[in-house]
Image (tube, coloured by chain):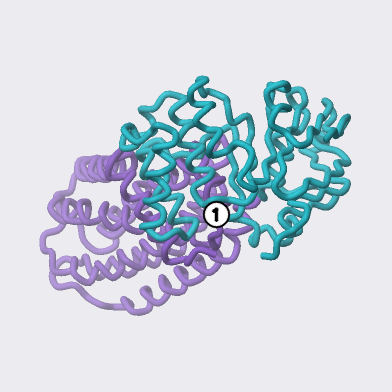
Amino acid sequence: MTEVENAVVLRGLGRDYGDLPALQDLDLDLPAGSSLVVLGPNGSGKSTLLRILSTLLRPTRGEATVLGYELPKESWKLRGQIGYLGHEPLLYQDLTGRENLELQGKLHGLSVEEANHRIDMDLEVMEMSRRADRRVNEYSAGMRQRIAICRAVLHRPKLLLLDEPDSNLDPEGRELARSLIGPGEGRTRVLVSHEPERARAEADAVLTLDRNGRAVELAS
Amino acid sequence: MTPSRTAFAALLGKDLRTEIRTMRSLPAMVLFAITTFIIFRYGLDRTTLSGSLAGGVLWTTLLFAAILGINRVFVSEQEEGGFDAFRLAPVDRTVLFTAKAAALFIYLSVLELIVVPTFAVFFLPQWSGLLPLILVLVGANLGFAALGTLISSMAVNSRARDLLVPLLLLPLVVPLMIAATGASAPLLEAGAPSYEEFGTWLLVMGLYDGIFCLVGYAVFEFLLED
């Protein structure tokens, strides 16, 4: 793929659940390598926006272009270039943390050597190396979130979609997570947060949605 | 795109590893089948069965034991976010269908490895029909696996999953059961097994398997979309 100027371009994007509009008339240009924080009350469509950008959800109307690919037509080209961290950790409970990451590596086409190298490195960063061989159903919520962060970045995605990534993490865990999912290193990030002050500090742009899923502010 | 063979092996390996670790499907299927044989033995008040009655008892039991496994095919994907994790990966969607169908085929084969000899001990005076019966079992397992995976993927997002699976599966599986019973009955006759219409019934099963493998392959991607 050629490098694109804007990682995310949205024009009149909307999504309904039945008769209920969750997201309405959203326009956005997010330059590659920058961080966007999405703020808004519960039910304002923040998570819906992330799921659309991740290709997990189809928009009801409007246009969305992510990393140069038009959604949903070219979704299949985009998969593998997105790191998605949602409310659920997307981890199999009866596998160990390491086994979950190995499975993720295989699904993303990494060689065994490359996957193992990255898994060891990321587990070390998140201070989970010693506990990686325990089953996920034995983890605390914070430990699950640490492994989920490793899962989201294992394939080194160009675009990170993070839905409240700090949830369940203690202050130490939040600090550790910064090196994997924080700003910098050319990553484009779209981050949903309920902590405006903390999120604004590391954002290049802030999008605020209202209860009807409309953008009320887009500030740089 | 990740090579389909790599993704298939990873998904199948995950399912088998999880089943060996948790034993959530197979023990229940085996226990159900053996209990049913005991009930048939005392309910029918017969120590031996042969022909179509033997075929009927065997396939009724296997069908309902299979439903227990089919109900659980996609439970971990639905409850633990496996569907989303898979949909985010650059993998052909039909790989999940083939991996799940392969896992179900293996579960059914293991079930039959335990249950069919038990059936023979309970009911059959002589066992010479068991060897050709393997062909019938393989043919039926293929059909169960393809149709079961398809139905399970349709029902998994419903809270009435346990009701929906038999409701959708049972009418569709009737032709397969007729063919399986038809092929098994002459093999299980008292005395030497006969091969009357054996080939015809196997052909019917092969046709059924082919149709549902193709249907599953063709529609599975649409079933995975939101």
Give left or right: position of B67 versus A214.
left
Q: Position of residue A195 (x, y in %)?
A: 68, 21
Please tell me how crowded label 1 is: few (under 14), some (14-19), or many (20+) other residues with Cα within 10 Å: many
* Among the 4 quarters of the image, the one containing residue B105: bottom left
Amino acid at pointer 1: Ala
Residue furthest to the front in view is A185
Decide which of A70, A201 is in the foreground and name it.
A201
Q: Position of residue B64 (x, y in %)?
A: 37, 47
Tally of numbered discs: 1
Give left or right: position of A51 versus A96.
right
Q: Residue at x 61, y 45 (%)?
A: A185
Quadrant housing the N terminus of chain B: bottom right
Residue under label 1: B89
Q: Position of residue B166 (x, y in %)?
A: 48, 46
Report the chain holding disc 1. Answer: B
Give left or right: position of B110 versus B4.
left
Decide which of B4, B117 is in the foreground and name it.
B4
Residue A142 visible in this rendered orientation of the protein: yes
Q: Colour of chain B?
A: purple
Decide which of B114, A4 is in the foreground and name it.
A4
Is residue A140 shown above or below A179?
A: above
Q: Position of residue B120 (x, y in %)?
A: 16, 56
Residue A56 visible in this rendered orientation of the protein: no
Disc 1, SS: loop
Is residue A96 shown above or below B145?
A: above
Q: Residue at x 64, y 46 (%)?
A: A187
Q: Colour of chain A?
A: cyan
Q: Residue at x 51, y 70 (%)?
A: B211
